[in-house]
Amino acid sequence: MIKRGKMASRNLAQMQNDALEIFRTGVEAVEPSAAVKRYCRREGNRLLVHQDAYDLTEFKRIYVIGAGKAGAPMAKAVEEILEGRITEGVINVKYGHLAKVSHVKIIEAGHPVPDEAGLEGTRAILDLASRAEKGDLVLCLISGGGSALLPLPAAGLSLQDKQDTTRVLLACGATIHEINSVRKHISGVKGGNLARAAYPATLISLILSDVVGDDLDVIASGPTVPDSSSFQDCLNIFDKYGIREKVPESVLNHIRKGIKGKVPETPKPADPVFTRTQSVIVGSNLACVEAAGEKARKLGYHTLVLSTMIEGETREVAYVHAAIAKEVLKSGYPLSPPACVLSGGETTVTIKGRGLGGRNQEFVLAAAMCLNGQEGIVMLSAGTDGTDGPTDAAGAVADGRTIQRAEELGLNPADFLSNNDAYHFFEKLGGLVKTGPTNTNVMDLRIMLVA
């Protein structure tokens, strides 16, 4: 028998409250305005960005562009730093993700599937970048959702082509890295093409990362950095998931032309357009998870971070997490109760049903089924942006009694899981986690509490 700490008597309701408090602390740690100001500040006429300094008197104009769910609060922070020195700005954000700004135009647009508002906003962003000259400074603010919010199609393609391709990729279970590789090669702005438009102006990108590993060329499909993927990679992705026949023919033809050299590749590292650029990650999933871990310790839990780079099929990841929670309860490995095990990253769901939900809600439902009957375990998984899939919930929370309560209500958890309908399952049980838009996005945070 393992020796338990002083929190062993803490009940499930208290543990669920702890999990929610830990989640909120993690999200607050990557609040966009604060994140920007940690890496960007002004001292007189000097703009300090991470380890570099810029003399503002050397620039004729200062433009602000960008896209992402956190774009508005990031723009607000930049306005406060520059104090009225911004000439003009345009930022695309997801509907409802707003903040009060004075010098930057905020355009609300569709996410995760792009729409006409996003298309018009991207044209305005590209136009502003193209007007920048050698003596100008362009600040580009990028955050989660930026890829869908910069939907300008490559020549010969339509917005509908991009929408249909995005839907196919999301439905087949492709990773965010794979989705963005395709997005870059059917776009007129991604994959370094925005940097190409801004050249020869000085370009500084402040980035809130929403991808595993914080790869700059993957975040928002890398509009201001060199692209490491190729047209051939795109075709390989289609073949991997067997979706050649589902992708629009115009997109498939565009990819084939690129492989043959009939369509220009995205700019690579040696391209001169990157000689006057700087890119800084101001917030990430790791920062979120570390802050969550510190909060858990203050609440009295022994804390372990599994990884912030977890990917894969949601249900499979859930089964592994549930097994770890049961091991903690049974043997005290890899740490003894009261325990908080944290993980981050972003999983995927292969959609086979017609229900409503997202990867976090499905994760918790699958985990709850594995934990059925286990005492003293609480599982929470939620998106840091406050949105999980096409729902108004950030995620869900459950415990070892969740499945029993569902069955007492006449609900069959397996049916809900097979129909990808975790939202309606947790809606009936009161297990949805709803935060509203957080105006940030650094992927997901999963919290397992064992006491």
Image (cartoon, rainbow, N blue to C red):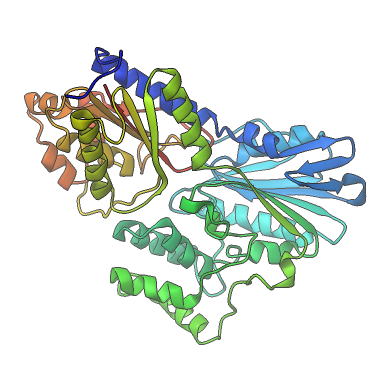
Q: Which residue is situated farthest in the right direction here?
A: 57
Q: Quadrant of residue 75?
A: top right
What residue do we see at 83% from left, 61% from top?
133
3, 170: nearer the viewer: 3
Q: How many marks?
A: 0
Give above or below for 352 relative to 107: below
Q: Quadrant of residue 93?
A: top right
Residue 437 appears in the figure: yes
Give above or below for 277 relative to 330: below
- Residue 22 in the image: state x and y as whole percent: 42, 25
What residue do we see at 34% from left, 62% from top?
168
Quarter of the image where the N terminus is located: top left
Give above or below for 362 relative to 438: below
Give above or below for 189 relative to 342: below
Answer left or right for 128 relative to 21.
right
422, 356: nearer the viewer: 422
What residue do we see at 32% from left, 54% from top?
312
Answer left or right for 279 relative to 376.
right
Q: Quadrant of residue 70?
A: top right
88, 278: nearer the viewer: 278
Answer left or right for 89 relative to 174.
right
- Residue 82 in the image: state x and y as whole percent: 80, 37
- Residue 86 in the image: state x and y as whole percent: 80, 42
What residue do we see at 21% from left, 28% from top?
329
Residue 441 appears in the figure: no
Quarter of the image where the C terminus is located: top left
- Residue 224 in the image: state x and y as whole percent: 65, 59
